[in-house]
Image (cartoon, grey):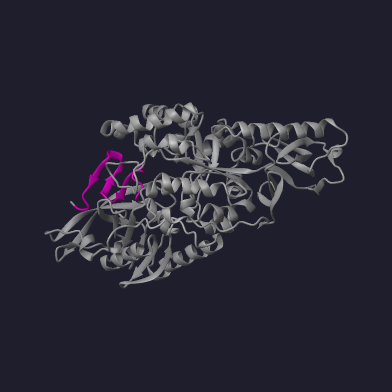
Amino acid sequence: MSRIDSMKRTMEYRTMVDVLMSEDRYADLVLAGGTIVNTLTRETYVGDVAVKGRHILMVGDCSKLIGPDTTYVNVEGRYLSPGFIDSHMHFESSMLTITEFSRLSIPSGTTTLVADPHEIGNALGPVGMKAMADEAGRVPNHVYLVVPCLAPDCPALETAGVDVSSKDIEDLLSYPNIIGIGEIQGFSNARHVYRNTPEIVTDIMASTSYAVGLNRTVDGNAPDLFGAELAAHILVAGGRASCHETTTKAECVEKLRQGVFVFMREGSTQKNMAECIRAVTEDGMDSRRCILATDDMVADDLRNLGHMNEIVRRTIRQGVDPVEAIQMVTINPSAYFRFEDRGALAPGKLADIVVLDDLYEMSVEAVFIEGKLTAHKGRLLVDLSPYVYPDTVKNSVRRAPLKKSDLEIRSDAAQVTGNCLVAIPDQNLTDALKVTLPVSGGVVSCDPKDDVLYIACIERYGRNGNIGKAFVRGFGMKQGAIAESVAHDTHNIVVAGASLEDMVTAVNRVIEMGGGIALADRSRVVDELRLPVGGLISDEQSGEEMAESIKRLAETARTQLSCAIHEPFMHLSFLALSTSPKWKITDKGLIDVENFRILPPIE
């Protein structure tokens, strides 16, 4: 906290003391007769909440704090909860600006967002991350960034738009609204990184040590790590880590025992909470280090389901007490991020308050942010001006159009064994498969009838022109192609299709748009969405418009291309995530993540 901020808070607190100690000064707002959700003691009871300025003045019997100018709100029969926190998410995955994401998120009770601009960081480097941090200061909710200390995560296996390393961290951590280091995926595959690229370990630790010295958080990323590998990951993170990649009960138990804050992920396509929470519901483990997070949410889910209230609702349905579930989006993340000013309804905390109609269904009636009524019955009550990003974060696609021959996989044999990665619904993990494929005119054919498609990843930043090629199963497409410039985490152009001609058509449209999503069939574009900001985000569409656009695109994929997997664009994007097992595709080829090597597309 700066000296100016400290003085401001001291003056605000002194004003509150004067109100409490005098007989002629009063609260600005009193929410009267509600049921307090006490996240400090894990209990509920009837009481009032009084607010002065931005802060909670008192909780309990606040009748004497009601004066002639006090706004009095009777909330009998409703529940009063601290505002919700999403502790790990990426705005880029929603394809929305922070402003438009907030427009959809605030009415459902989420008052604080901690975002990792890992995606725009890979595409644009510090310029992109700072642009996002600038927007974070313009919205009524609290938005903070934790930034990547390494891009790309696997330099030997992929190409990012801009390389980020420890040389950038001092500058980034001094920038407004940036509070720490995001997920350290560069040491997710701990043993192979240590053996093959030890210099990366040294560079990551230089960044994390600097952050820890500033008392900043460092997020871990430890999928399927146990024992010595998990311990090493915790140490590389500075001795205090989180993990949002925990997918099994056994992992959750191990990480909680080792002091890791487990971010139980429950987003639009990756749903791990039900498995992780078994460590609490079945083994009775202490839930103080269990935190709910979304990681990735699409606009349509935000609009139709809600945000953290929906995730809490799902957690309650797994047998968790409602107050304990609410702790996982309030006081637990506040403890992790050292947010001393929120997470509970208590004197001196920010007056971020959610009024709930029903504690089990988590239906939100009203949202107060810093004491101001910001949303009521699903409607945002404050004006949010559309945010338009500067040209410095646009025009990130810098490569020539493709030809069909660029995507061909050639062989002199009559048939070949193809290496095929397998998409797993609702996970960013994949499986690995060997398939037999025919060769026609020297070109290896895919097999849509057996759900085997071509997949390729095309370097889009103009740095080397790489194209990685392989095969994929799991989309069910019978024809056409889908291409997008959203491809975790380096965000080159990823394309999957039943024909090379359609793949070229879709990719070239993405290049022409300067980033986005394109669907092609019979060598023509049948649907598209422009994403001009880093090839990841639209500053041209509202949240409602984006929800409709993605819904329309998914319907086109389903009806015209026979795509069977839900949220196909997010599933496709994660097939390029080189830090997540088993096989992935990058611009350098098919990646055997578990063995840290590049595989040929055919054998």
- Give the position of the N terminus as an image quadrant: top right
Residue 50 shown left or right of residue 325 in the figure: right
Nearer to us in this view, 179 or 294:
179
Nearer to us in this view, 430 or 179:
179
Residue lying at 43% horizontally and 59% vertically, measured from the top left: 532
Residue 482 in the image: above or below residue 172 = below
Residue 595, percent across and down?
Answer: 27, 39
**The stretch drawn in magenta includes residue 580:** yes
Residue lying at 59% horizontally and 58% vertically, measured from the top left: 385
Residue lying at 25% horizontally and 49% vertically, measured from the top left: 588
Q: Residue furthest left?
A: 412
**The stretch drawn in magenta includes residue 263:** no
Nearer to us in this view, 202 or 387:
387
Q: Residue furthest front?
A: 4
Which of the 4 quarters of the picture holds residue 59? top right
Residue 34 shown left or right of residue 445 in the figure: right
- Tell me if residue 14 can be seen: yes
- Tell me if residue 347 can be seen: no
Residue 19 shown left or right of residue 37 in the figure: right
Residue 419, percent across and down?
Answer: 24, 52
Residue 330, percent across and down?
Answer: 62, 39
Chain part drawn in magenta: 576-602
Q: How many marks?
A: 0
Residue 388 shown left or right of residue 230 in the figure: right
Residue 48 in the image: above or below residue 575 = above
Residue 156, percent across and down?
Answer: 27, 41
Residue 163 in the image: above or below residue 508 = above
